[in-house]
Amino acid sequence: MLRLETRPQPSKAMSFASPLIALAITVVVGVVLFLILGKDPLAGLRMFFVEPVKNLYGLAELSVKATPLILIALGLAVCYRSNVWNIGAEGQYIFGALGGGWIAMQAGPGTEWMGQGYVVLILLGGVLAGMFWAAVVALLRDRFNANEILVSLMLVYVATLLLSWLVSGPWQDPNGHGFPQTITFLAQTKLPRLVQGLRAHIGLVVALVAVACFWVFMFRTYRGFALQVGGLAPAAARYAGFSARSALWVSLLLSGAMAGLAGALETAGPLGQLTTFVPVGYGFAAIIVAYVGRLHPVGIIFSGFLMSMFYIGGELAQSRLGLPKALTGVFQGLLLFALLACDTLIFYRVRWRSAPAAPPTSNISSTAAAVAKGA
Amino acid sequence: MDGLELLIAASLNAGTALAIAGIGLLINERAGILNLGAEGLMLVAAIAGFAVAVHSNPWLAFAAGMAAGALLAACFGLLVIWLNTNQVATGLALSIFGSGLSAFVGIPYVSEKLGEQAQFKIPFLGDIPFIGPALFRQHPMVYIAMALVAALAWFLYRTRAGLVLRAIGESPESAHALGYPVRRIRMMAVLAGGAMCGLAGAYISVIYTPLWIEGMVAGKGWIALALTTFATWRPARVLLGAYLFGGVTMLQFYFQARGVHVPSEFLAMLPYLATVVVLVLISRNASWIRANMPASLGKPFFPGS
Amino acid sequence: MLRLELVNISKQYPAVKANDSVNLRVLPGEIHAVLGENGAGKSTMMKMIYGAVRPDEGEIRWNGQAVNIRNPQEARALGISMVFQHFSLFDTLSAAENVWLGLDKSLSLAEVTQRMMKVEKEYGLDVEPLRPVHSLSVGERQRVEIVRALMTNPKCLILDEPTSVLTPQAVDKLFVTLRKLAAQGTSILYISHKLDEIRALCTNCTVLRGGKVTGMVDPRIETNAGLSRLMIGAEPPQLQHRPAQLGAVVLDVRGLNLPKEDHFGMNLEGVRLDVKAGEIVGIAGVSGNGQQELMAALSGEDTRAPTGSTFLFGRDISQAPPRERRKAGLHFVPEERLGRGAVPTLSLAANTLLTRTETVRGSGWIDTGAVAALAQSLIARFFVKAGGPDAAAKSLSGGNLQKFIVGREIDANPKLLIVSQPTWGVDVGAAAQIRGELLALRDKGCALLVVSEELDELFEICDRMVVIAKGKVSPSVATSKATIEMIGEWMSGLWPQSGTSNNAEAAHAAA
């Protein structure tokens, strides 16, 4: 029978291998799923893993999706390492879109002197708005000990409804034929593109810079160390004198800022206006990105691109093979499940153990009976 | 919806799914397992139940929902109990997976309708003015939910098996030292809890709003999680809290019928804001929560350490 | 005929052979000691007898017949019952419910409660059956454990280090109970590392060292030195004692009142205490009397103390957080190594950063090279057996990790070192080394405050002692003038209640 044995030292090799094994498991299940649906599994795999990276256009599209995922996941990684379970990144993303979008809507003749620099204001607005929404969660946990998982999640629903109200009410485009959407933002608000003709924008650069900053923060600063100790061993953090309250606020504000930044980037970039379709689940997919990336900034780059491949692959599979787009969600969830299972291998070894040789023996109950009778 | 008695009736209806999911989660948490995958479980059970209901009757649909819930819960239990994965992350994974899976499986059912809904009424009691329409014209599942709550309370506090379950939630290490099969009992709790969440999910898609839309559980799984804390892990309070939340959810329709001029989106926010408010009120006294919460909740258990 | 016999029993764990062909022979009605230091293999042996663990090789015989004990229920069915060192109790349930859970028969709760009261009366172990366990003192909790074991009518009762939570007077009462049981024919397996107790109580003794049996002797005719030689292969290491060179008052606690933070805690009341440079002051006391709360208040993990209660070199630090106290020269070694003194999954190098920030630049940048060098120097200086500065904290044995943690704080050149349970769960060699380091630190002029549940340890290294009981602290007494009986009484709160703090003469007169 299989037994799990604790490793004396967590295995670094498995740390790298585990996401790959998890991916392999997901692919295998995917192939099975394709067969069940009566589609050619090789074609399906091609949609997900080959088509998106075939050319520069594909890579540009990948980067557009990967940028918000990476940004949000960076913030979430800090949170989860500190044992602060921010599940409401989607709501903070929405608020970032609202904040950035509002500033974008104020653009007009009066702001033309700023040129493209206006974009900085938009991004700043997104960051602040995202931080605000996360601060609500932090405050309720700090003052009232309210569980941040449930509060942050409830606030996602509230944010979604708020967006819906704004784009069908006060912020609705008067010339929009009654659709729930704002005006299309002016050209001034558009994010500068990286390459002419492709949709990749400076958001990618921002994301990569963020990766570097987060790496330094988490692994080379005392503050980052303190946050992680808080997540690994709260009693040790208390002993060392690391404030749990400051860890709570720093991680929530940071992840709120990142989610808000992602929201603003999307609004000023690919979307160009606010609609009810702003929330697409990046906030939740980023949770998976964070985990598959081992809660590590460099790993998150890879898992961010991997997750984008799932998104784009799903879209291609729908348009070209007639497979439902909902497949993407299934694969994402499956990947996380498989990863969590594989992660046990980092801390445990699997061993075959045969049952111990039983010494020549009599049955327990007859021995007990004999004892009761005579001894 | 007009009239207070209809509001009460609707609250009971709306609260039933919450109550059933709530006691499912209660069973889990009393054993020390935190299952954040409730929303995903309920979604998958909802589509399973709806699919079966389209082809046969509601009672088989309930069974299908329970089976689906138990099956997914088994996967969850395998990971958190035997592989000791992080309960929060695994629960989230289950929710995300369940959400994706239910959307995928539900595609062919989006425009399906179930047959005519039967109208139920308890003879005699259902005819009493005001109380009759308020309380006694519900689907049988509403009353079954109340019975389930009573049964759970009896089980937890009056049987030895219930005592063992509470002991395991308090200290799995001590229970293990005494020779109890902690992991097996926890797995049974997870399966039972999953079946309950599944039943709740099926109720939502078959009785409460008999149709299928992606994501139709709309956060009830999460609210049920808040409920167990709100109820300080006691079955009767779960029922009470569920009906209160059901009431808050129904308030939006009540206000609309009364012509209250608040944008519908804000009324729709009510259940979620109410959850936040309730969490804040109940969690303020941290040491009281600690004294009532099953001490091993969410923590991994390693036998033979 | 032997009641219980272990024949060539072996058990291998991944890193160590815990039991190597051990033999054990227990007669009916015998009080049989199993002696060995921490890590010798005593608990593994007991776990196999009790059914929690299966042996790899060898045979267990019960009343002459070979048996295969697969789980604790089967052990109980045979008549083997165990009282654990770390209680297997459920805090929120009542004593009766706890006992009920430990029994296999299908008796009702009411029947169990009734029988409980009968058993308690017979053996002098009073505990109210309906009280929730969290409201019981540690001694009372142990009584619940013992009652639970007795109610299975055991033919063999195993007690694992039962006296670490008892005052000396309570230990005597326990021995009376055990002798009564033995006279009725029950065999008793008494696991301990306390030589005096074993010689006072037991009629037979099996000594374990490094997983092997090194001797089967009659403790009544052995000396402590003889037993010690069997247990660790040598005489107990002697420590160098120099007379204390006292300096100024370093720590001054003036009437500390601190309400408990937790439902299950203990209030501190009017704690008065002082430690001078160049001396070691010990705090004796049975666990659960406020030591945790006092340590947290002194280390800075709990900053709720009212101002004006705690002074370091005359500076009020009552509400200072830990980092500020460390800057002022106060360092602390907590009793929990893994999870509080060190983070289990982090490397030794990273663990230095918990309390040593010399390797961090002003901007917050961590100099990883310096961190590794610091860890390496600690490993070398304190003879820590580890895989290097990158070894995870949890890969070290208890003794080595404790040496590292104590070393980390000593190396910081503290002015005041507070240590809680310095040698708990540590093998004799490491324990002697740690005590030697503490004495050396004191000789250099540091002030030390040591909390320990091992009276012998306190008597060995402390210059003065106080006792903590029910959240209050006694006046101090010079170790040379104190006796075990006196301290034992004080542990029940029975110290002379005079108005001033340091009243050694009054204490001496009362003793």
Image (spheres, coloured by chain):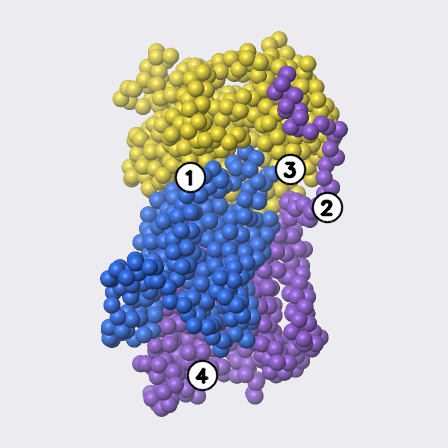
Disc 2 packing (10 Å; few <14; some 14–19; many ≥20): few
Quick one: label 4 or label 2, which is nearer the N terminus?
Answer: 4
Task: Tell which tag, 3 or 2, sits nearer the viewer.
Answer: 2
CA neighbours of label 1 inside 10 A, class few (<14), some (14 to 19), many (20+): few
- Where in the figure is residue A99, as x and y percent of width and height? 38, 75
Look at mark 3 in the image and give the residue it sits on: C385
Please tell me whether residue A251 is drawn above or below residue C208 in the rendered image: below
Q: Which residue is mark 4?
A: A272
- State the hue of chain B: blue
Pointer 3 local density, CA inside 10 Å: few below 14, some 14–19, many at least 20? some
Q: Mark 4 or 1, which is nearer the eye?
A: 1
The answer to whether dots 3 and 1 both sit on one chain is: no
- Asked whether residue B150 is in view, the answer is yes
**Residue occupying the point 61% across, 80% down:** A322
Chain C shade in the render:
yellow
Q: Nearer the viewer, residue B180 or A257?
A: B180
Q: Secondary structure at mark 4?
A: loop
Mark whose residue sits in front, 3 or 1: 1
